[in-house]
Amino acid sequence: MSGKITFTMIKPDAVADGHIGAILGKISEAGFKIKALKLTQLTVADAKKFYEVHAERPFYGELVDFMSSGPIVAAVLENENAVESFRTLIGATNPADAAEGTIRKMFARSIGENAVHGSDSDENALLEASFHFAGKEIF
Ligand code: CMP
């Protein structure tokens, strides 16, 4: 049974490129309900911790620098089969491989600066939501 919650960030590239409104519009049109939302910025320590699972990857340093380079929008979203349906909406990690009409195809700059994050499992969705939001900030 798949969960109803996923976590997303609109990444610094898409915030800087002025795409917050358009991306939240696509998310709402796709039927996701916003349970929590904030404009914030990750410190280097926050980004290192959030992406700890990628610490051994060659792109980890670049990823941490980029994700802490400017404001992001963090959100908790609700929908049926939330993790999988959101990953379908955002498209492949590399925008060059993403399907037409997906958020990454429309708004991402590159594989590293790829506009949005989407949780990869129900377990991680809950961990990521609680990394960014206190219980009283989730409605
Ligand atoms: P996301 O899936 O949100 O979380 C891990 C991130 O690592 C991923 O998005 C990409 O932004 C980044 N990433 C994955 N592969 C590469 C790569 N080959 N080069 C740079 N960044 C990458």
Image (tube, rainbow, N blue to C red):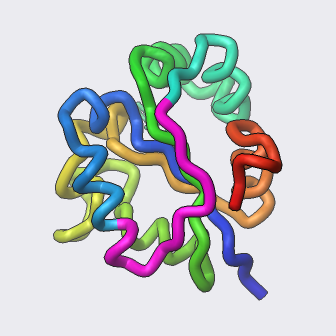
Q: Quadrant of residue 18?
A: top left
Residue 89 percent across, percent down from the top left: 38, 70
For the point 35% across and 57% down, the residue is 24
For the point 82% across and 49% down, the residue is 135
Image quadrant where one finds the N terminus: bottom right
Residue 122 percent across, percent down from the top left: 74, 66
Task: Say if 73 sits above or below 65 in the image.
Answer: below
Task: Say if 42 sits above or below 7 in the image.
Answer: above
What segment is highlighted magenta in the picture? 27-39
Image quadrant where one finds the C terminus: bottom right
* Viewer-side residue, 113 vs 55: 113
Residue 42 percent across, percent down from the top left: 57, 21
Kindly tell me whether residue 59 is visible in this rendering.
no
Task: Say if 105 sits above or below 53 in the image.
Answer: below
Kindly tell me whether residue 10 is visible in this rendering.
yes
* Viewer-side residue, 138 vs 58: 138
User: Residue 31 lies in magenta, yes or no?
Assistant: yes
For the point 37% across and 78% down, the residue is 30
Q: Quadrant of residue 25?
A: bottom left
Left or right: 53 in relation to 43: right
